[in-house]
Structure formats: structure tokens, C-alpha cells
Amino acid sequence: MKVFARDLKSKIIELNNEYSCILLTGARQVGKSTLFKSIMEELGISREVVTLDDFEERSLAKNDPAMFLQIHDTPLMIDEVQYAPELFSYIKIAIDNGAAPGSFWLTGSQTFRLMELAQESLAGRVAILRLPPLSQHEVYGTGANLPFSLDLNSLKSRKKTHTPATLNEIYERIWKGSMPAILSGKFSDRDVYYSSYLQTYIERDVSELIKGVDKLLFQDFIRAAACRIGEVLNIHAMADDLGISDDTAKRWIQVLEKSDVITLLRPYSNNALHRTIKTPKLYFFDTGLVAFLTKYSSPEILANGALSGHIIENYAVMEIIKSYSNAAKEPLFWYYRDKDNKEVDMIIEIDGVLHPLEIKRSVNPGTELIRAFNVLERSTVPKGVGGIICMRPDLSAINSDNLLIPIWYI
């Protein structure tokens, strides 16, 4: 079984010397506890590990958190901590009483809820990190991870740390997805894995967040969302397809976002741009789950299917986001669309400069694609170098302000 070096590991080791508590969030089965355990092995640290998937441990943590922390000595790792939010106040007390750096490692799969709990109870006392599914750098690359940027020297360096891929190879990466259990070879049957993954996610996370949810209907809702990746979110259309209310569809989208199944790319606007559309775009963290939900049985069929353009956009957007999450950085990400149909697939704001990006599966994308970038000239924030992420084999440029970037460089 293949083991992948996680790009976030070095940051966790660094923070472990500074913070008494580290909270690692992310979707189910992305490798949170595995990453912590690999750090324990690397550092030669002995640490008690408790999972709140164990109902007896969960009951004690919820009903008597003080006793739970008396029974389990530090340094301690608590897995699936979202099941016992009562622990946070007692962890705060332990930290305020002088708990050593690295005393508490916490993992959980309800990202937004955990971040809220940590910020309420452990503000200034906890390092909060998000672990995404595997990135293409972690699976196919070498060397240190650098957040994706439009700096030319930084892009040129990526040729040494990333592995080239043809169009067919990119779609194979997309179809296989980014879940460690599949890519490591632990499970060979992708369809069985994703089917079980969905059932576990709905039974545990969704049922916890939505009491009395219709589980089959919610699975249909996830499939309806997967069919709409890369599109402006249309809550009413999704609700109408499934015969549920708009309010229910909105709540369910929020659940998918809170549990890191999807991300919503918010629209960019400011006072100088008056005709912008205000609705976010929808993307899934794992393209393999999308391919499973939309019933594409092979990479070749996916590459020629109706979803081929949207799923390659989804892949590129998420790989860019992963490159920042894996460096524990949070820049501002947007897209742009206005009522005149001018659109920019993605905008990254770095150091007060906007960098527009288009994403195309073409080897030779047309230079007309960069025209929409000019709309950002009206913004009060300066526009920097832009780029077209595409299927070119090597880095190139349209001009000094617009680059042509192979998708395998991300």
C-alpha cells in the first residue's frame, strides 16, 4: 500500500512547538488521523489516541468532559472531536493552567462547526488547519509544496516539483479522485468505496447536522449538486428537481459546505463594479466523487462527456485551493461574472493585487479569452498578471501580462 507524504506535515510539526492545541479539520477519510500518526512516528512521540466514534468514549466526553480529560493523559489525540463540543471549555482550562505545547491534537470532519467552537472557546490558544484530499503534487510530485502563484520564477520552479500529464492522464487523475484510501491501493474497487463513503457520510455527519433527514433524498441532492459543478448555484432549480423547498435546498447546501464536500467560490465585486452577479459557483473537493455520482464509468468516457469542461475547471480550482491549504495560507479566491456575460473563472488576490485566471481544456486556447480580464481594470484593487490554465505541455505566454499555464503545473 502506497503512503503519501502530506504537504501540511512540516507546518504541523512547526506549530506543535508553539501551540498547546492543534485542530485539524477536513472531510471524512482525507487522512487527518493518519497524518497525525505519521508525525508521531517521525518525531518518536508516544501519545494516547482516543476516537469519539467509540460510543462509550463519546458518552463520557459529552457527559463528564472533566473526567474524560482526567482519564486520558496528555499528550493526547482526540479523533472526531465534533461529537463532544463540551470538551472545548475544559481543554481551554487545561491550556490556561499551563498545558505544554503539543498537549492536544484534535481532528474533526465538520469544519465550520469546529472552527466556530474553537474560536469561541479556544481563541488564541489553538492552531486551526484544514487538510484537503490529496493534491496532485502530493500524489505525483516531489519536493516542497509552494502555493500556486502567477509569479514567473515560482511557476518555472514547478516544472521540477510536478509531473507532466497529457489530457488523458489528467482525466485519469480526475476520475480516480483524491481520496487516500483509493490512491494508496488500500481499496481497489472505486465504486464500492464511494458508495460506502456516501453512506457513512450521510449516516454520521448529515444525520448529526439534520435531524430526521430523508437519507435517500439527501443522496439524490448530492448527485444533483455534482451535476452542477462549475455553474452558478441555482438553489431553486435544485429544489424543483427534487421536490423540496428552496429553504431546504439552501440548508442542505450549507451542510455540504460545512462538511467539506463542496466549496462555494464567491463572486468578486466592489463599488466600482455595478453589474456583477452575486451568486456563488459550486465545486466539489473530490472530482472522483463527482465522477462516481454522475455515473462516468471510465476516464475516457468522462473526457468525452457533457461534464468534461466543468470537471476540469473543478479540478484546477480545487488544486489551486489545495496548494494554499497545504501551506496553511488563506488568500482571497473569487470568480467574476456580470450581467453583460463577461466572466473570469477564478481570481486570486495576493498582496493586494488581483490575478485573473481562465481554465480551458484546449492545448491552444484563443487569446480572446483574456479580454474579460480587462473588466478588473475598473476595480479599485490593482490587476496583476493573469493566466490561462490549459493543456499546453509547457509554460508559455500570450504577452508579458498573461501566461499560458499547463494544468499539471498547479
Image (cartoon, rainbow, N blue to C red):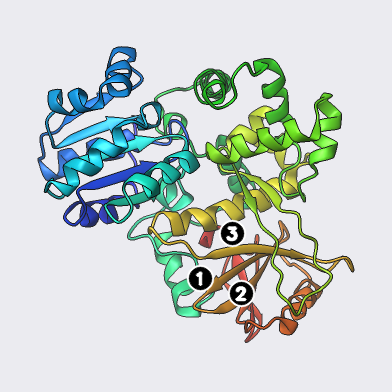
- How many angstroms separate mark 2 from mark 1 (CA)? 9 Å
Q: What is the x, y in percent for residue 129?
A: 37, 50
Question: Residue 274 has which mark?
Answer: none
Residue found at the very far right of the displayed protein: 340
**Callout 3, which amino acid?**
Ile
Q: Residues within 10 Å of mark 1 (few under 14, many from 20)?
A: some
- How many angstroms separate mark 2 from mark 3 (CA)? 16 Å
Looking at the rendering, which quadrant does residue 84 occupy? Answer: top left
- For the point 74% across and 45% down, which residue is it? 308
Q: What is the x, y in percent for residue 13?
A: 21, 52
Residue 294 visible within the image: no
Q: Mark 1 points at which residue?
A: 149
Question: Residue 355 has which mark?
Answer: 2
Above or below for 244 versus 43 = above
Question: Residue 407 has which mark?
Answer: 3
Q: Nearer the viewer, residue 177 or 59?
A: 59
Q: Are marks 2 and 1 in contact (CB under 8 Å)?
A: yes
